[in-house]
Amino acid sequence: MSVRTGIIGCGKVGQIHTEALRALECSEFVAVCDANLSRAEKFASDYGVAAFDNLDEMFSNSGVEAVMVCTPHPLHEEPTVAAAKAGVHVLIEKPMASSLESCDRMLQATRDGNVKLGIVSQRRLFEPVQRMKRAIDAGKIGHPVLGTFHMYSWRDQAYYESDPWRGRWDTEGGGVLVNQSPHQLDLLQWFMGEIEEITGVWSNLNHPYIEVEDTALAIVRFKSGALGNIVTSLSQKPGIDTTVHVHGSNGASVGVMTDKGASFVAGVSEIADPPLNDVWTIPGEEHLLAEFEQEDRAHFANINATLYYHQLQIEDFLKAIQEDRDPLVTGEEGRRVVEMFTAIYRSNDERKPVKFPLT
Ligand SMILES: NC(=O)c1ccc[n+]([C@@H]2O[C@H](COP(=O)([O-])OP(=O)(O)OC[C@H]3O[C@@H](n4cnc5c(N)ncnc54)[C@H](O)[C@@H]3O)[C@@H](O)[C@H]2O)c1
């Protein structure tokens, strides 16, 4: 039996979700909703589904059982809470929200409505990331003692002007931390474990035409005693260079270059270069790095990476409904990313380390 699915937010990432929902056997794609009816109608006529500009009408009239929330970040809450009240399962685009209060309301509503809640973090499904996670969990680096996430990337003025909600505190909720960094913040905490405290700073270095930060730095102390470092920036032209590295108590390191080459903007450009392990110094496995690269390049040549990993995560979410289990990334895990960037903003404001859990 397939799950009757729909999309809320017919924009750039909504297009990727649509293609995934049409391709998956476990999905019967039935409806789309957008505050802008003409956008919903365009999707509806392209894909032969029902169009709505009103959430309650969509939930009452389309028979939809699961929705993908693809609206701008501060607007994830309203459709999620409405879906939960209607008994509809929800997979939300990253980040879960732009505030912890919003996360908590969504968690409560989905618990009350007894529906599944998942958060998109499709880079967890990259082969080099899965390989790292398996090696860490198998104890091949001892235990993680140092984790780093670095991103050097760029967005131009045209990008910020492409949608009215970008680059503003009230409509985007933040800058590079909230929009471009959630994937790697998620990977860092997934690999390293629970956080004890964060010290952070942010600034807008090269984008005078936006309000929000284009650069943030942080030092993380994990509960295990491990340390972490974050440098994430949209101030370097051209292209993108993004890595997450984990160093272990036996001196061995594993790492992934999650994004490389031309900047990828969903719905605007395609992922041009494969994600690859760029560090692998597990004793006796050093020679595998070249094999991994060959394997990952061959796989990348056979998939549409822009769609493939979203499709895998959406499939996992629909199967979680069918099998009545947790999805790959739960709402509680999505909230951890929001806690991380909230801590960096708060630490910058208060000029001191911020203890977890945040109050
Ligand atoms: N996982 C990824 O790799 C990835 C990539 C890109 C974007 N995203 C996330 O997807 C979300 C959307 O980004 P986008 O680039 O597609 O934005 P977008 O502006 O292209 O699309 C957003 C759509 O939501 C609609 N909308 C706004 N308010 C609404 C409401 N209240 N009800 C219904 N529809 C509403 C807009 O009309 C628009 O069509 C963001 O949270 C972003 O972070 C994730």
Image (cartoon, helix red, strand yellow):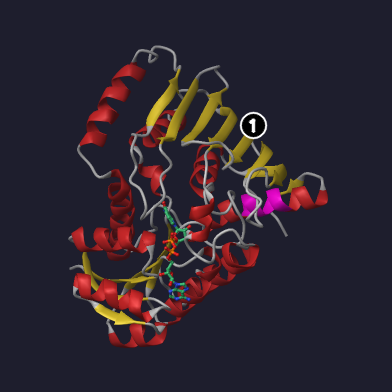
Asked if 154 appears above or below 159 in the picture, the reply is: above
Q: Please state the horizontal and vertical placement of residue 151, each as a whole percent of the image.
A: 54, 37
Asked if 63 appears above or below 202 in the picture, the reply is: below
Say which amino acid is labelled 1.
Ala
Task: Classify residue 358 as left or right of residue 20.
Answer: right
Quadrant of res 114: bottom left
Question: Residue at the spot x=46%, y=80% of the render?
Answer: 82
Q: Mark 1 sits on what residue?
A: 226
Asked if 337 appears above or below 172 in the picture, the reply is: above
Q: Which of 116 and 41 is in front in this view?
A: 41
Residue 348 part of the magenta-drawn span: no
Question: Residue at the spot x=42%, y=77% of the render?
Answer: 83
Q: Quadrant of ligand 1?
A: bottom left
Q: Nearer the viewer, residue 232 or 135?
A: 232
- In this orientation, does residue 129 appear? yes
Task: Classify residue 182 as left or right of residue 328.
Answer: right
- Range of residues picked out in magenta: 339-345
Magenta: main secondary structure equals helix
